Structures are given as structure tokens and as C-alpha cells.
Amino acid sequence: MYRDGTLCLYHPPTQPWSGKSDLHKTIIPWTAEWLVYYELYQTEKKWQGPAVPHGPI
């Protein structure tokens, strides 16, 4: 998550998204995947999903 509480769902340089992208093919699956990793994080206290370093929003 970013500091403002929004979800960090994708890495724009490697996984671009535009307003023309279909939500059912992009944001919705990315959110579902994030939720799986978040639930694992809650139990294991370690992020198991993909991650890239990024600065504050």
C-alpha cells in the first residue's frame, strides 16, 4: 500500500495501465491477487507477493 492508503497493484514501467484498459482484465484481477497476498501477509508477517522498490506517492 502507498502511504495514503491506496493499493499498490502494479508497477507502471513493467505493467502499464491506461484509461482504455478493460477493468475486468486489469484492475479487478490485480486487486484480487493483492488481497490474497495481503491475507498471507496478515498471517505470516512477510510479503509473499511480487514487489519492487518505489518511493512515496
Image (cartoon, rainbow, N blue to C red):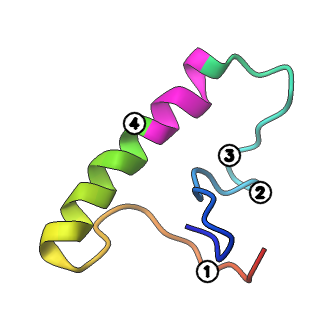
The reply to whether the C-beta atoms of the residues labelled 4 and 2 are less than 8 Å apart is: no
Range of magenta residues:
24-31
Residue of label 1: 53
Residue 48: quarter of image: bottom left
Q: Amino acid at mark 1?
A: Pro
Indicate the quadrant containing the N terminus: top left, top right, bottom left or bottom right.
Answer: bottom right
Q: Is residue 37 left or right of residue 34?
A: left
Q: CA distance from mark 1 to mark 2?
A: 12 Å
Q: How many neighbours does mark 4 have within 10 angstroms: few (below 14), some (14-19), or many (20 or more)?
A: few
- Label 1 to label 3: alpha-carbon separation: 15 Å
Mark 4 lies on residue: 32
Vertical side of 43 occupied by 36: above or below: above
CA distance separating discs 2 and 3: 6 Å
Label drawn at residue 15: 3
Q: Give the Cα distance between marks 4 and 1.
A: 21 Å
- Label pair 2/3, CB-CB below 8 angstroms: no
Crowding at dot 3, Cα within 10 Å, few <14 / some 14-19 / many 20+, comes out as: few
- Foreground of the two, 49 or 42: 42
Q: Is residue 6 left or right of residue 42?
A: right
Q: Tag 2, which secondary structure?
A: loop
* Amino acid at the residue labelled 2: Pro
Write the residue at 22% across / 68% down: 42
> Residue at horizontal 32%, vertical 59%?
38
| Residue at horizontal 60 percent and vertical 65 percent from the top | 5
Q: Which residue is mark 2?
A: 13
Q: Earlier in the sequence, mark 4 or mark 3?
A: 3
The residue drawn where x is 76% and y is 43% is 16
Alpha-carbon distance for marks 4 and 3?
A: 16 Å
Q: Position of residue 55 (x, y in %)?
A: 73, 83
- Mark 4 and mark 2 lie on one chain; the one further toward the N terminus is 2
In this rendering, the answer to whether 46 lies above or below 43 is below
Q: Position of residue 10 (x, y in %)?
A: 61, 51
